[in-house]
Structures are given as C-alpha cells and as structure tokens.
Amino acid sequence: METPVLTHEILAALGLDLADYDRLVGDIYDGALDPKPLARTLENLRMAFQANYVTLILRVPDQPDMAVMIIAGDIEGEGEVIYMAYPQANRPFDNQPQDVVFTVDDIMTPSQWEQSSYFKMYCSQQNVYHVMGADISTHEGGLLRFRVTRAKAAPKFSVNDRALCAMFLPHLRRGLNIHNLLDRSESLSDLYAQAISRLSVATLVLDESGSVLRVNPVAQGILASGDGLKLVGGRLEATYPSDNRELQRLIRAAFAQDTVKSADAMSVTRPSGQVNLGLVVEPIPSLDWADEKGKPAALVYIRDAASKSLASEVVTKQLFNLTKAETALAMELANGLSLEEAAETLNIRRNTARAHLRSIFSKTGVRRQTELVRILLNSVVALGKPQATLKVAAKPKVQVPPLTLASRRQA
C-alpha cells in the first residue's frame, strides 16, 4: 500500500497539530544524546499512535533468538536497553523494502497471521495483534527495526498512521546516527584518557574561569597528597605563593584573547622535598559556534617524576617473554630501585636477583641496568591494563544501564 504524504488534515485526524509533531521530532534528537530521552521519545510515539508498545530494535547479536532493543509499553525493563526474545528464523517481517512503512496486513491475511508460529510464540502472549513498522537503513549499511503495535481490540493502523510513521523515519535514522557518532567519539576519548593515565600523566580540564571541570585518576592522587598542588574553591593552586603566581599567570595566558596560544610549562616545588612536579598548561581550541559558559578551555598536564610506574606486568611478561619472577624484578628496577633494594623488596637473595637480571638482559638484548630501565619506560608496557584498576572520573551524563532480560510485568 502506498503511504500518503503527511498533511495538516492528517495530523488533525490523528488528534495532533504541528506543535505536537515538532515536539515529537525534537524528542528524537534529544534522545540521540542520551538513551533516557530516547525512551521518553518512544513513549510519546506510543501515545501518539495509541499503541500498546513501540519498539526500536537496535541490533540483532550473534546469540540465537535474542536482540538488543528499547521498548515503550507495559513491560518489565521498559525504557531500558535490554535483551529480549527475537527469533532469528521465521520472522514474517524480514526482507521488507527498507525505509518503507508496512503493516502485517500488507504481508499476510488475518488468518495466516493468527496461525503463524511467530504470532503464537511472541505476539499473542504480549497482547500484540496489529503491527506497523519499518526497517530503517543506517548510514553504514545497517538496519534499525522500528515497530508499533496494538491489541486485537484496537483499530487497525490507518493510512493516516502510516503517513505519520513515514515522516518519523528519516528523523529516527539521523538521530541514531548522531548517537552512534557521539558514542564512538566518547569511547575513543575514554581510551585516550586511560592511556594518558597509564603513562602516569595527570590531567585537569579547566573552564574559561579557571574552575576545574574534570580530573583523571593520576591527578586525583596528586591533589589528594597536597604536596605542591591543591584545589581551593574548585580552582587549581600551588602551595607556595611564588609558584602560585606563575601558575595563575599561565592559566590566564591560556584564556587570553587575540594572542598566539601555545603550551607553557613550569616547575612546582613540593613541601615534602621530593623532586619538583612538572606542569604544562595548554589552551583547548574552541570550535563552538555559540558563546557558552562552563566549556573546556584549558588542559593542565602534571608529571610526578618520583611516582611509580603503572606499567602492566602482564604486558611486560608477554613483550619480553619474562618469567613471573623476572617480571617482578624488572618492574621494581623500572620504578628506580637498585638491584639490592629490589631484592629486599621482593624478599629474594641478591644472588637470585642477579641471576634473574642476567636472564632479563639476555631476553631483552641489553647489557646494562640503565638500558633496561630505558627500554621498559619507552616501550608499550605502560599502555596495558595495570594491576591496580584505574578509576575513571565521573561524567555528567546518564550511563547506559546494564543489559538485562525482560518479561511482561505481572498484574
């Protein structure tokens, strides 16, 4: 059946006006930024279509008869990203033309539908009878399966319903594409942030007023120690006045307008007497089209030369084919201990430590302890997952809930 073009008259027949339609479309794009608003979007669509369920099937994983989906309706797990039964075989809606609205009446007769195994096993139990949907093509060749359903006692989906549904399809496609692009960008950003932390580099993100927006786990440790740097009223300060004056000058320079901006460095004295902290302030280029407050404006890097390496023992062992004992010794040497100090720390004899070191030299191809430390610190060992799990700083966004199995709510 050909789908008519949506008009003011069709909207009015469905009990909607342009403001309602605009709100529903706006909800789709709000949902692109976060799964929670997307659940609200589906609920609003459910109300607009007077449906018992609206379902967005995001993907079909390799697991047989399961799919990842978001559902609006009276069902356990409503509005969450969940796993739910979705047969891989004998689906009557497979192979439909993409981006075209269909109903079950386009595919089979009511008798055929009621006798189908799909209806008996998955639809009748959920009070689903009338089905309208579309397989929405994505920008990268995938499919988003959009389904709207009603109970048997409800009226069939009309041509007006089809027209409204057709108008939502391009917006759903674009909204989900925006969500995927943002999700990938955030995933890459998280990986880069983890890599920076594993290299023992502390990072703090500042807004245009100098307030700290975000810190990584290494920075949390440095600030918690209060040895040279601290947070005062949400702003980064140095312990000693002379250092703090220079630090504030670098931060102000990063925010300065109409100047050539570059990364500036300084050394921060520590009250404990340990080696000074190295600090770099770098401006964050702004690509925003609108002037906004509270956006990232500068990045502060801090390096503690006295800190222990976060190198992964597993990666070190795999990279150089070391034994567990050899790896433990290599890690202590990389942290600046002498051979005697490492032997004492590991509670082994000096002769045993020397034997391990000779074996390490043979496997790594070096002849001196200083060379060994250099190749360890310059290799990829720090990029593996460290023994101590790094804690990711909290983000100001709603996290996607864990995937769970769903079933219809009990009355």
Image: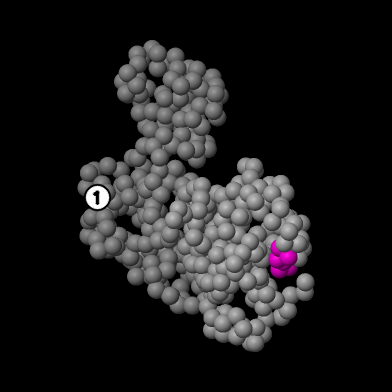
Residue 100 lies in the magenta stretch: yes
Q: In this view, does 138 lie above or below 393?
A: below
Q: In this view, does 67 lie to the left or right of 277?
A: right
In front of the other: 283 or 103: 103
In front of the other: 52 or 115: 115
Q: Is residue 213 above or below residue 122?
A: below
Q: Give the residue at x 26% y 47%.
A: 225
Place of residue 145 in the rendered image (x, y in percent of width and height, measured from the top left): 65, 59
Question: For residue 93, what is the image quadrant?
Answer: bottom right
Place of residue 354 in the rendered image (x, y in percent of width and height, measured from the top left): 42, 16
Q: Give the residue at x 39% y 46%.
A: 391
The mark tally for this picture is 1
In front of the other: 213 or 316: 213
Place of residue 251 in the rendered image (x, y in percent of width and height, measured from the top left): 36, 65
Q: If the image is split into quadrants, where does the C terminus sit?
A: bottom left
What residue would you read off at disc 1?
226
Q: Circle 1 — which element?
A: loop
Q: Is residue 354 above or below residue 195?
A: above
Question: For residue 19, what is the image quadrant?
Answer: bottom right
Amino acid found under the numbered disc labelled 1: Gly
Place of residue 29 in the rendered image (x, y in percent of width and height, measured from the top left): 55, 70
Residue 167 lies in the magenta stretch: no
- State whether residue 230 appears in this view: yes
Q: In this view, does 135 lie to the left or right of 282?
A: right
Residue range corresponding to the magenta coloring? 98-105
Q: Is residue 299 left or right of residue 120?
A: left
How busy is the neighbourhood of tag 1: few (under 14 within 10 Å), some, or many (20 plus)?
A: some
